[in-house]
Image (cartoon, rainbow, N blue to C red):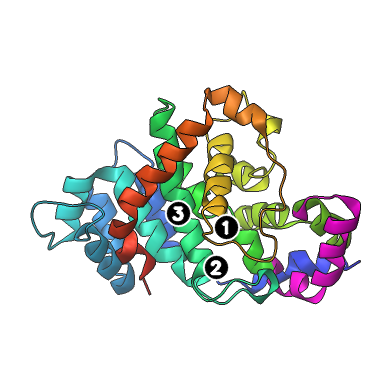
Amino acid sequence: MIDVDVIIKSINKLPPFPDVASRALQILDDPRASVDQVISVIQYDQAVTANVLKLCNSAYYGLRRKVHSLREGLVLLGNAELKSIILASTTVRLFQQENKGYDLAKGELWKHAVATGIISKIISDRVGASEHPSLFTAALLHDIGKVVLNSFVDRYFEQIIALVNEGELSFLEAESKMLGINHAEVGAKTGESWNFPGDIVQAIRLHHSPEEVLDDDPITPIIYLANIITLSMGIGVGRDGLSYRGKQEVLKHYGLKAKDLQEIVVDFYDQYSKVQDILKLS
């Protein structure tokens, strides 16, 4: 087994979460924040500004007129959507690389992250929940631990998959047994290192174990379902495949049936062609 401290220290090799994006997201969390406060932070970051304008004008948002400035984008889309755009444009660089450990080609982990984020919104709307401000952020970043754990899983993959096949363990359980830690736990520690709010860190840590917080957490069970649905559609299915445990209690909690899941998939594919500008961020 690898020394877990070696894995934890490897988190420091990730680029730090950009200060501009972090400050902007904090401001957007405050309903009293003014347009000028947000603009004053974002306007000096050319990459973020360019991506914000690109996505504001994408088919996904379907605005009737062209957005030419950050001010227009904020006024037309509102804080929640602008927050999603800033987050997507900031984190894309972390997810677009090839992920050999999990056998994911370049861009596949990013597609999985975006799809999970969008499906989490669809589920939230379907179950009649008001969309939590942290939902999209946590959904987009739920697999950030795979970026960190990539090389370690690649090195020990044969042993991990043998544990899955022989011991009837889930992939997450096999990761923990072989490496001393799993990608959900590593992802949570990454979120902590970036000073993310506790609800986002918890959702990342428990996105395979929603039963632990089913009655007390408004976002983790939804992200769990969104992740499973995304995997079932073949988006971001790597070496770990579908080797995770199903949690029927989550479906019962929300009163969802097989038909509901099918309709959620249909809703996603209705939106999928409009998501291409998000997937093509660079």
Q: Earlier in the sequence, mark 2 or mark 1?
A: 2
Q: Look at the image and give the residue range highlighted in magenta.
A: 149-171
Q: Nearer the viewer, mark 3 or mark 2?
A: 3
84 versus 245 height, above or below = below
- In this view, the residue in front, 26 or 266, is 266
Q: Residue at x 44, y 27 (%)?
A: 127
Q: Is residue 282 magenta?
A: no
Where residue 117 sits: x, y (%)?
45, 49
Report the amino acid beneath label 1: Trp
Q: Residue at x 15, y 61 (%)?
A: 69
Q: Earlier in the sequence, mark 3 or mark 2?
A: 2
Q: Which residue is label 2 attached to?
A: 16
Q: Residue at x 28, y 53 (%)?
A: 38
138 versus 40 height, above or below = above
Density class for disc 2 (Cα within 10 Å; few <14, some 14-19, many ≥20) is few
Q: Is residue 159 magenta?
A: yes
